[in-house]
Image (tube, rainbow, N blue to C red):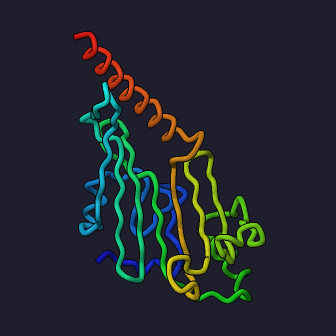
Amino acid sequence: MPDASWATSPVETNHSTSGPQIAGLRLGMTRLQFLEIYPDAEWSLETPQIHCHGRPLSSDFVERGQAGWNSGHEWLSVKFHRVGNSLRLNSIEYRNPIDFDAEGFEALRNQLDLRFGTHSRLLIPAKLDAARLLVGFEWSESKNYNMTYRIHHDTHGSGNELFATYRLTDWFPGSSVQESGDRQQRSVYAKLRNTCTASRRK
């Protein structure tokens, strides 16, 4: 089981070198690097597919993948997209149970800002009652990544337990990673459509 002691003191970060990491993971890691840390994660891979003359036509190009891991108290979900010749980690979401007292809000905010820099947005609880959110913070940095930290009630169980959820991603509208992935996806689907058209002429 990977070391999750970081969870009691929020996500590690180093702005001058590698950027933030969650549960020992950094954006841009390969699938093999991820599996070295979480060898028991459950995996699924996706390949592009279209319907050609009523039948599925699939590419042998693995476009993306996702994996999940949990220990009963912790939950991790990651997503990978194709970058060049390999799948690269572009989204990390980690959740763990916590204790939180509303009187500690200012101390929490100061601690998070000290670790990540001043937050770019405070998520307003009054607008997020449906998610039963107590408080949330968001950081964005020059289109390189987006990170959120949320404290919320359990939405899958009894609803009484509190959780902290961290989410880190570089896959969002306008990011260079997403734009590159979209171009590559369009190219793969164009090849599939061309293959289908060519088969119709035979």
Instruction: Tell me if residue 61 comes above or below residue 95 in the rendering.
Output: above
* Residue that sits furthest to the left in the current view: 202
* Residue that sits furthest to the front in the current view: 54
* Residue that sits furthest to the right in the current view: 126
Residue 55 image position (x, y, % from top left): 28, 32
Q: Nearer the viewer, residue 85 or 109?
A: 85
Q: Nearer the viewer, residue 110 or 126?
A: 126
Q: What residue do we see at 39% from left, 67% from top? A: 24
Q: What residue do we see at 62% from left, 46% from top? A: 142
Q: Quadrant of residue 114?
A: bottom right
Query: For the image shown, how many numbered marks are present on the structure?
Result: 0
Looking at the figure, which quarter contains the C terminus?
A: top left
Residue 121 image position (x, y, % from top left): 72, 61
Q: What residue do we see at 29% from left, 59% from top? A: 43
Q: What residue do we see at 34% from left, 60% from top? A: 67
Instruction: Tell me if residue 192 comes above or below residue 142 in the rendering.
Output: above
* Residue that sits furthest to the top in the current view: 201
- On screen, residue 127 versus residue 156, left or right, reads right
Residue 28 image position (x, y, % from top left): 40, 50
Residue 13 image position (x, y, % from top left): 51, 65
Instruction: Tell me if residue 72 comes above or below residue 29 in the rendering.
Output: below
- On screen, residue 165 versus residue 46, left or right, reads right
Looking at the figure, which quarter contains the N terminus?
A: bottom left
